[in-house]
Image (cartoon, helix red, strand yellow):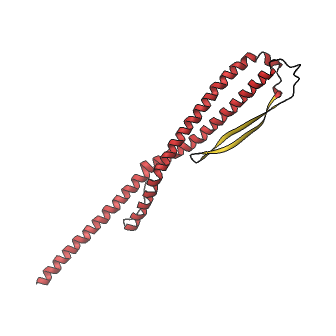
């Protein structure tokens, strides 16, 4: 990082202020990054758990597959998916509030006896699939923000803060050298003045 600065007190004070801003922001950014990392892991675990549950239910559904030839797929429809947003570490993420199914009327007397159980199983698999998709989406959103936050932490920690500290140190040394030269030249002038006044 190439910082542009001048070797004077004003430039030094501006750099000190900018350094302080970054040093104050760094712990907050690190906390946000670790919170996001934890939430990404939770979302990934929940998506995986739902995936496993869905596989179990689908295996149960396979037992019905021969019977599903008789099943009318239009009986079960998703009527409404209620979505809200929730902030996690300052990031808006989708939150699945509710899933409403619409069950079409069917003749209980003509339909096979397994229909109610098949409908319930189909609803459960649909619900699991939608929940899983939500957790995957949540994980993707949080992971994207976490990566940006990690980049910012690294930028502050490894690039900007050391660059500001280095620039401040250079200005400090320059000003000290200038002050020492000034004092040395004053001593030389004083000693010459004293020598001349003794003549």
Q: Where is residue 108 drawn, in percent x and y?
A: 87, 22
Q: Nearer the viewer, residue 61 or 154?
A: 61
Q: Where is residue 77 drawn, in percent x and y?
A: 80, 31
Please say if 146 is above or below 132: below
Count the numbered circles shown.
Answer: 0
Q: Where is residue 24 drawn, in percent x and y?
A: 45, 54
> In the picture, residue 145 is in which quadrant?
top right
Left or right of 32: which side holds 61? right
Left or right of 114: which side holds 50? left
Left or right of 46: which side holds 11? left
The residue depicted at 43 percent of the width and 63 percent of the height is 14
The residue depicted at 40 percent of the width and 54 percent of the height is 163
> In the picture, residue 187 is in which quadrant?
bottom left
Please say if 139 is above or below 192: above
Q: Nearer the viewer, residue 185 or 37?
A: 37
The residue depicted at 15 percent of the width and 80 percent of the height is 194
Look at the image and tell me in which quarter the C terminus lies: bottom left
Q: Which of 102 and 25 is in front in this view?
A: 102
The residue depicted at 57 percent of the width and 35 percent of the height is 42
Please say if 165 is above or below 45: below
Q: Which of 198 and 78 is in front in this view?
A: 78
């Amino acid at each position: 990082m190439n910082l542009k600065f001048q070797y004077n007190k004003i430039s030094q004070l501006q750099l000190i202020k900018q350094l302080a801003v970054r040093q104050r922001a760094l712990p907050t950014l690190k906390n946000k990054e670790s919170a996001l990392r934890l939430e990404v892991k939770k979302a990934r675990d929940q998506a995986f758990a739902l995936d496993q549950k869905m596989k179990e239910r689908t295996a149960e559904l396979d037992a019905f597959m021969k019977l599903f030839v008789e099943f009318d797929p239009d009986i079960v429809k998703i009527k409404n998916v209620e979505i809200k947003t929730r902030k996690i570490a300052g990031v808006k993420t989708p939150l699945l509030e509710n899933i409403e199914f619409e069950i079409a009327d069917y003749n209980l007397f003509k339909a096979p006896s397994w229909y109610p159980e098949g409908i319930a199983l189909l609803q459960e698999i649909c619900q699991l699939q939608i929940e899983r998709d939500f957790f995957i989406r949540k994980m993707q959103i949080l992971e994207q923000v976490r990566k940006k936050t990690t980049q910012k932490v690294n930028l502050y920690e490894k690039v900007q803060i050391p660059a500001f500290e280095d620039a401040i140190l250079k200005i400090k040394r320059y000003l000290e050298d200038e002050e020492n030269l000034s004092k040395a030249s004053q001593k030389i002038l004083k000693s010459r003045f004293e020598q001349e006044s003794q003549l």
